Each structure stands twice: as structure tokens, then as C-alpha cells.
Image (tube, grey):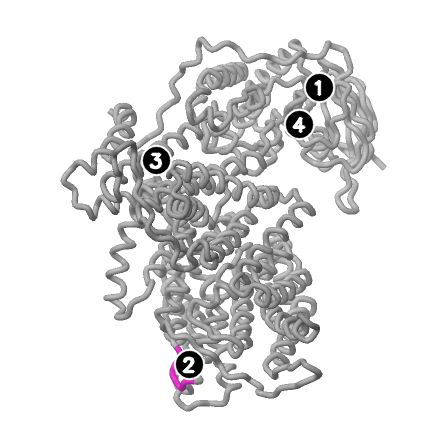
Amino acid sequence: MSANLRRWAFPVFAAAMLVLPALPVPDFWITQSSYIGMYALVSLGLVLLTGVAGLTSFGQAAFVGVGAYTAAFLTVNLAASPWLALLLGVVFAIVAALIVGAITLRMSGHYLPLATIAWGLALNYTMANMDWLGKYDGIVGVPTLTLGSVDLGTGRGLHVLVWVFALLAALAVTRLLDSRTGRAIRSLRSGSTMAEAMGVSTFRYKLVIFVIAAVLAAMSGWLFAFFQRTVNPTPFSLGKGIEYLFMAVLGGVSHVWGAFLGAAVVKLTDDQLQVLLPRLIGTSGNFETIVFGLVLIGVLKYAPDGLWTFAGRWWPAADRPRDWDKAPPLPTRDKPEIGGPLLEVSAVRKEFGGLVAVNNVSFDIRAGDIVALIGPNGAGKSTTFNLITGVLPLTSGEVRFRGQTVSGLPSREIARRGVSRTFQHVKMNPDMTVLENVALGGHLRGSSGAVRAMLRMDREEERQLFAEAERQLARIGMTEHMHELAGNLPMGPQRLMEIARALCTDPALLLLDEPAAGLRHKEKQALAKVLRQLKSEGVSLLLVEHDMDFVMGLADRIVVMEFGTRLMEGTPAEVQASPEVRAAYLGTEH
Amino acid sequence: MDLSIASILALDGLTNGAVYALLALATVLLFAVTRVIFIPQGEFVAFGALTLALFQAGRVPGTVWFLLALAAAAAVSDVIDGVRHRRAAQRIAIQVVRTLAWPVVASAIAIWAAPQNPPLLVQALLTMALVTPFGSLIYRLAYESLADAPVLVLLIVSVGVHFALVGLGLFFFGAEGFRNPSFWDARFSAGGLTLSGQAVIIFLVSLALIAMLWLVFERTLVGKALRATAVNRLGARLMGISSAGAGRLAFAMAAFIGALSGLLIGPTTTIFYDSGFLIGLKGFVAAVFAGLSSYPLALVGALGVGLLESFGSFWASSFKEVIVFSSILPVLLWRSLRDPHGEEH
């Protein structure tokens, strides 16, 4: 029943919206529905930005304006083809988004919305003051759109085109989110450290979705110009930009269909309020902003997932169909020869202000070694990990991997060279399934981008990635959990999932930060077995661990750290016999 | 342009810049203490200016009813909160009285005094007394229960607050614009340069306020508590500093600064119910220049915005807003190159 519902919901909805103009529906509702389609296009971009990636923009109305003014100016003043105007409007929007995004997206997330406020205001004032854009009067007399010999007009004909755009956009965004690029985008919200460690250029993907959102807005503006047949600065003001965000938040900012629901609710109530409120209050004015403002605050407080969650409750997600049995395996990396030099850490140092967290620590790892880094709390083990993997910049010293200097590289470049890791505090996307989280580890082994994902040209690669993800999950005995949301797992399995994700990158060196913490005895034994098997395949391991039984039974060599310095290095037997190590852990007798 | 025009423009720019500086300081203060990016800071400016204007006209300003409405909403939320936590009726009543005391007393005085046309200074003091409690009430109603939400959510809430305040401003003040009389009509001429008494007042009050803020933050326990909250909310909480209390105080200070800015800027331009937004955003550009973190840089940025605006309006008057708001992009570029790795918490 529910599987059928899911399969047929979109085609039925799409057909209904496209057939609507042919039915005896009053013109008023056709107009409303056209507005909803155009608004939903814009809010769809905001769903991508705000709900999926944790960014936001108040300036989407300005991008709508770019599309609308380009269409109006080209078709009225230059008598150019509307389709050329669509192309140019999109290009202008992309250029503007690239500039605003390139400037702000390297900084923390709140600078983008601030910049978009400025961009929205500045563009709006520019439109209102340019003689050749008609100043406040704008451009009037935009022709209607024709398709072949059919004049689409501004009513029923255009409604079809609006909804073709809106539905295709919804389909494209849905497909995008379920792809290699989509997993990278969905990992942006939980900070950049983990995504970067999996080889994702977070800056690039933030820019990609900001551009996509701008393109959707520009398309909406292009439609708007032919729908209204006149453009002026008012519908592209900052206030309107904020209203688009309101639609997305109200509808459900993390769901594609939330954009449509929000656009519909806002458009329909807006009209009612504009009539009702002035009558209630006794004078005319934009009093509906009061309601919008209060509702926006209320939604964020009491229903942060918006209205769509209420719809989504009787719409449970289906397990991903297992269609990757016959997928050919992904190519693997050449592993270094066992016993050869792999990682050389020489005199690495990290100072935080006056505190020396890691003080000129050196050690080597040969290929096929399992090396453990142990020491009391605060000894600098995790910081050393972060220095090796490029999460933190070095103060001084050098790290060489397979003969190349990697210190100073960003962590995604170090990941590309074959170093993968897990985190002391699990970092994952709780809203993705276990399988998808693990498949994120395969990011660098695929290559499909956003456009291929939207056109579904990436399915073969997706099957390969999921086959690999499942293989790694099977290795740590977690296949039965693969369709669960990662956020629903207990702590121990979450750690194991991180290991599977790291394995999915096909590493030559794997850094595990307290892999056994939170695991039960049996699980620890199973994990030790997996790690030994990895060693036999030529993967080298560096692990931080507090469970001494686990470490002593597994490691070939142990590096002991205390107060940021290397205390000693040796075999497990040597370390156990060392009086210094005993003193570091237990104190000295006096 | 000759030197005399340039100096007139510079003086004009610095006068406005001084007001923007106050707003920028308030924005930085709020972000540091509560992580709220407070878009509606400018609304306090409009409320301050309009309240004084209505006192001038001998009318009871709409601020009174607005304030009472907010206070009533906060009192209702006190009661709901109290019942939900099963507090004793007496404790709930005390809390309600605390919430209502200032707004009701200030409103009562305002209603009584308004028709009697008190001196300008008294009207100004009443205005401050009416607008300042808006800050803590807005914090309580909109932000307090979301105090630990991400910056992005708080920012969107700010937008909602802005929407609501502008609409309510229209309801309580009407669409009419007002221009206040100067506090000091004197004029000083030196060469080709004329300095109005109002400009002198703007400079002096801005300086006094900055000095006062400095004293509060450096020398008082309350100020140090706010700074502690800004540095580390959890740590401050463990030391017994209420982060909700710090938030209310910071918002009250922001409303105080906003209302004062409204009094200062009121005589230099006509203010409508929605004029605050643009004025506030200019303070905002300055705060962004300071990375929302440095008070001295915010000051420099604000004076820069004021100068840019006055020279911009001389060269291309219809594009002065475009110039001011576009200037945020090179500023952000500079910040991005200087400090590219700002990871969110």
C-alpha cells in the first residue's frame, strides 16, 4: 500500500498540476497555482541551502529580479528571443552567486546571509535607479511567451510551463540529494572537519548549492516576467527575499516538498490576510508581516521541521532497493610494499597560544605495521592525529607520507593520498542511513557531479559505491543496520560505522581515534580481528586507545606520549616493562 | 569638490557615523553575549524617535500600548511557565509582578505626563524608559527558549522579529513620518564650516555612551559577567552567571542604545515606522566589518560607513545606498582572506 503510494504520488501530483488548466477551474485558482509554482522554485533553492546544508540566503528575491529584468529588458528593448533571455538570466545569476559565494563561503556560515542582505538591498536600489531599467516604474509591455506557434498567454498556458519548471526542479533536486554530490552536500551541515577528512571540498559544494539556488530563483524570475508582463523593483526587494525563506521554513526546510507546501500556504493565507487584517484593524497597511513574523518565530520554536513533517508522518521512508549485486568493484589503490617506509613524523609541534600541546614528536610507521599511540589524558594524542591528517596546521615539523611531504596540505588532499581516519567524538550525518554515511567515505573514488546526478547518469557509479559501502559494513558485521538512520544507532555501532566509512576510502594508512571505546567485549574481539585482517592486506594502522588489553594484543609497536612529548617507543613488552611509562600512568613512589 | 565641501561632507558623515557606531556596538554586544545576529536593532531607533515625536505633539505615544502588549504577553508566558513547572502560586505572582512592574509604571507616567507637555529633556527620559524594556521583553518572548539553537536559527528568528516589529510599528505609530526638534539650536561657524548644536550633542552623547560602556565592561561585576558569558556560555553558567539573565540585560542595553540613537538622529531626518531598518543595517555593515567581535573595529567601521554615505550621496546621490551596502562585499573579502578558517561551533 504505502510502497504504491510512494511510487505513484509524484506522477499523480505532476499530472494533476499539468492538467489543471484544462479542467473547469476558475481563473483565480489558476493564477494562484502559477504563483505557487514560481514561489516554490525559489524556496526549493532555500531548502537546499538552509535545510540541507545549514546555510541560508535572504537575497533570493534579488536573483529572481536578475532573471526577470534580463527577460524583460531583452525581449522589450532588444526584441530578443525569450529563450536567449532565459539563458542569459541564468548566466548572470550564476556569475553573481559565484562572486557573493566565493567571498563569503570560506568563513563561518552566518556571513553568507549577511552578504545576501547587502546584495539584495544593493541590487534592488540599482534596479530602482537605473534609467535604462525604467527606475521605479520598471519595464512594461513584456510580450507573452510562444512555444512554436502556440501563444502561452499569462493564464492557463503559462501555468503548464511554470509547473513543468517547478516539477522538473523538484525531481532534479530530489535526484541530486540522492547521489555522491548529494551526500557531500548533506554532510556540510555538521561542520566541515569530517567532510573534509573524507575528501570533500566543503567550500566547493557550498558554492555549488548556492549557485543552484540562484539558478532556480532566476528561472522563477524569467517565468514571472512573462506572467506579469511587467517588471518593477518591488517584487524583488529584501522583504520578498525574506518571505521566500519564510515559505521554506514554514513548509519544512529539510524536505523538497516542504518548499511547495510552504509556498502554497503562504500565498493562499497572504491573500486572505491582506483583505482581513486591514478590515480588522481599520486602516490599510502591510499588517500581514506581523502574522508572518510571529508565525516564523513560532515555527522555529515549536515545529522546527515545518509543516511537511506532519505530512511526512504517514509517509515513512523506504529502504533503498538493493540493486548493486552485479556492480563491478571500484578500482583500488596500489598499496605500499609491506615493510617499506609509509609515514614519517619528524619533530611535529603544535602550540595553542602559549600552550605546547605537541612538543617535537617524531615516529615512523612502516607499511603493514599496527602502531598504537598511548598516554594519559591530555598527552596530545588526538592533537597529533589532527596534525597528521591536516585538520590542524602544524606550528613546525614535517609529516611525510609515502615519500611525499603532506604537512601543510588541507585534510582532503591528505585523504586523497590514502590517509583515512575516525574521530574521538563520532562525526556523522545522523539524518542519513548507515549505508549512505559509509558511502560518503567513497567520495574520492567516484567522480559524478551535480549535473550527472540530476540526469541520473550516475547510477552505475552509485551502485559501485553502495556495493563497496555494503562490503565494508559486512566486514565489521553491521549489514543488518545498513538501512537505519545513523543517528538512531547506539554509541558502539556508530564508532564501527565510522571505521567502515574510513575503510570505504580504500586507505593505505588508517588512523583510529579510540575505536574500542563503548564496545562490548565480543565486539572488541571482532574489531581486533578486522584490524588484523586489514594489516594482512597491507593497510597500516595508527590507533589511539585506552584499552590496554586491546592495544597490547594488537599493536606491533607502541609510542607513549606524556605532556605533549614522546616518552618512549617500543614493542608492547618493552612498554609494559618500562618504569617511565608506569610512572606516567600511575605516578611515582616517594 | 573643494576643501570646504569635502569638510562639510566629512563632518556630516562623521555625525551619522557616530550614530551608526552606537548601533554597531549594540550589534556586536548582542552577538557576543547571545550569538543573536539582531537585524531589528534599527527598529529601536525608529521607536525612540517616534515616541519622542508623539510626546512633542502632546499625544500618548503608541509605544505605551505596544509595551503593555509585550509585557502582557511576557506575563502570560510567565504564568504558563510557572504552571508547567508546578511552581507555587506566590512565586508565579512575584515573577509576573517583576515582569510587569517597569512597563506598567513607565506607561502610567507616560500617559499622565503626555498631555501636559513636559520639557524636552523629560520627554526624552520618558522615551528611554519606554523603549529600553522592549529589549528584554523581545529577548524573553522570541529568543530565550532557543538560546542554544544554532546561529542560523537565531538569525532567522531575528528576521521574524523584524517582520513583526515593523508591522506592529505601523499599527501602533501609523504611517505618518516625524521630524523632531533639535535638542540644541546653536550653530557654530568656523571658516566655511558650520557645526550645528545637534551635531555637537551627537558627538558628545556617543562619546559618553562609549565611555560608559567601557566602564561597565571593565569596572563592574555585571559587565564582567556579560563578558564572561560572551567568552564561554557554559563556563559562565557554571560560575553562577545566568545566561538568560545576561541575554535580557544585553538586549535591554541594545534597546537603550537604539532608543538613544533614535533621539540623536530624530532631528536630522524624517523618521517613519519602518525607517529604522536601513539605519540599523548601516550599523550592521560596520559590525560585520568588525567581524561581529571587535568593539574598536566596529567604531572605525561605523565612521567609515558614515563617510562613505555622505561622499557617496555627493557623487551619486541616488546610488548612495548601493554604495554603502555593496561596500560590505570587499569588507567580507578582506575578512575572508585574513581569517579563512572560521568553523562554526
How many C-alpha atoms fall within 10 Å of the one at disc 4: few (<14), some, or many (≥20)? many
* Label ID, residue A223: none
Q: To which residue does mark 1 refer?
A: A552
Residue A182, image x and y in percent? 48, 30
| Most common SS among magenta residues | loop
State the image coordinates of residue B274 (x, y, percent, origin top left). 43, 67
Q: Quick one: label 4 or label 3, which is nearer the N terminus?
A: 3
- SS state under label 2: helix
Residue occupied by mark 4: A413
Tag 1 near tag 2, CB within 8 Å:
no
Residue at horizontal 22 percent and vertical 40 percent from the top: A156
Q: Is residue A261 above or below residue A386?
A: below
Chain under numbered label 3: A
Gap in Å between the C-alphas at discs 4 and 3?
Answer: 38 Å
Question: Which numbered disc, 3 or 1, marks the residue that appears first in the sequence?
Answer: 3
With B286 as the anchor, is A468 left or right in this view?
left
Residue type, label 2: Leu
Q: Residues within 10 Å of mark 2 (few under 14, many from 20)?
A: many
**The C terminus of chain B, quarter of image:** top right
Is residue B60 shown in magenta?
Answer: yes
Quadrant of the rendering where the N terminus of chain B is positioned = bottom right
In magenta, the rendered stretch is B57-61
